[in-house]
Amino acid sequence: MAHIVVDVKGETCPIPLIETRKALRKAAEGDVVEVVGTHQASKREIPMAVKNLGLQLLDITDADDGTWRIRIRK
Amino acid sequence: MADKATIVVHSGDYDKIYSALIIGTGALAMGMEASLYFTFWGLQRLKKNGLERGPLSKMHMLGLGKWMIRRRMQKANVAKLETLMREFRDLGGKVIACEMTMEIMGVGKEDLREDWIDEYGAVGAYVQEAKDSKITLFI
């Protein structure tokens, strides 16, 4: 099972969502996709997409510098 | 079958093309299918080198307004329309070009970015797509 990191720091709508989707499409079942970004609206939207795609949201963590990390299992 | 979004792109305005492509890619990213039906002024944006050419829908001011908005967008790191179109297609989005507009405006296939276009259709193509869609918009 692979651990895939998607770095979308500094990217704005809709790139974080698109890159997340692309990584999830490429990932194999069981892989963990970790998205790292700074765009705040995307932090709320990516979990919605995960739900719509029927995948598992593992956790969301925030760093002091405004960076968030979302981990998703395919 | 996945939920679907179908958008009529009637406007050729720069900002409205952004709306169409952002909603289209957003729908695909959220797990939906998406189709964009380019007609009238929107179809002009499918011409070779045409995608970024549209005027701003408001405050275009002979190009000054567009220049200012583009500068601000660049500063905010907003993706180019070309990038969004590429992502839209990579995620499986469908682009339909209106044949009647092509006839009226004397636009041939060779004038268009054929590599972006999945289908050439008329109103039937739109209705066929829209009747199975959860979201349908006219931009």
Image (tube, rainbow, N blue to C red):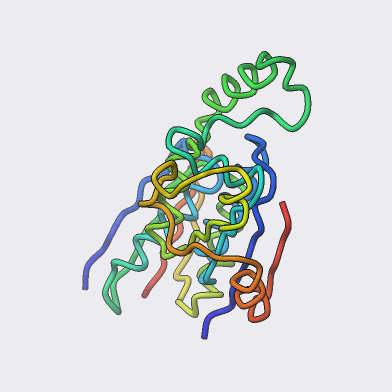
The quadrant of the rendering that contains the N terminus of chain A is bottom left
Residue depicted at x 73% and y 57%: B138
Q: Nearer the viewer, residue B129 or A31?
A: B129
Give above or below for B59 relative to B115.
above
Q: Position of residue B86 (x, y in %)?
A: 40, 49
Q: Position of residue B121 (x, y in %)?
A: 55, 65
Residue B27 appears in which quarter of the rendering?
bottom right
Residue depicted at x 61% and y 57%: B100
Q: Nearer the viewer, residue B109 or A18?
A: B109
Q: Nearer the viewer, residue B121 or A12?
A: B121
Lateral position of residue B80 relative to residue B23, left or right: left
Residue A58 appears in which quarter of the rendering?
bottom left
Q: Residue furthest bottom?
A: B1
Residue depicted at x 43% and y 41%: B111
Residue depicted at x 60% and y 74%: B129
Q: Residue furthest right?
A: B58
The quadrant of the rendering that contains the C terminus of chain A is bottom left
Q: Is residue B107 visible?
A: yes
Q: Position of residue A52 (x, y in %)?
A: 55, 75
Q: Position of residue B8 (x, y in %)?
A: 66, 58
Q: Is residue B29 visible?
A: no
Lateral position of residue B136 relative to residue B81, left or right: right
Lateral position of residue B124 relative to residue A67, left or right: right
Lateral position of residue B93 relative to residue B99, left or right: left
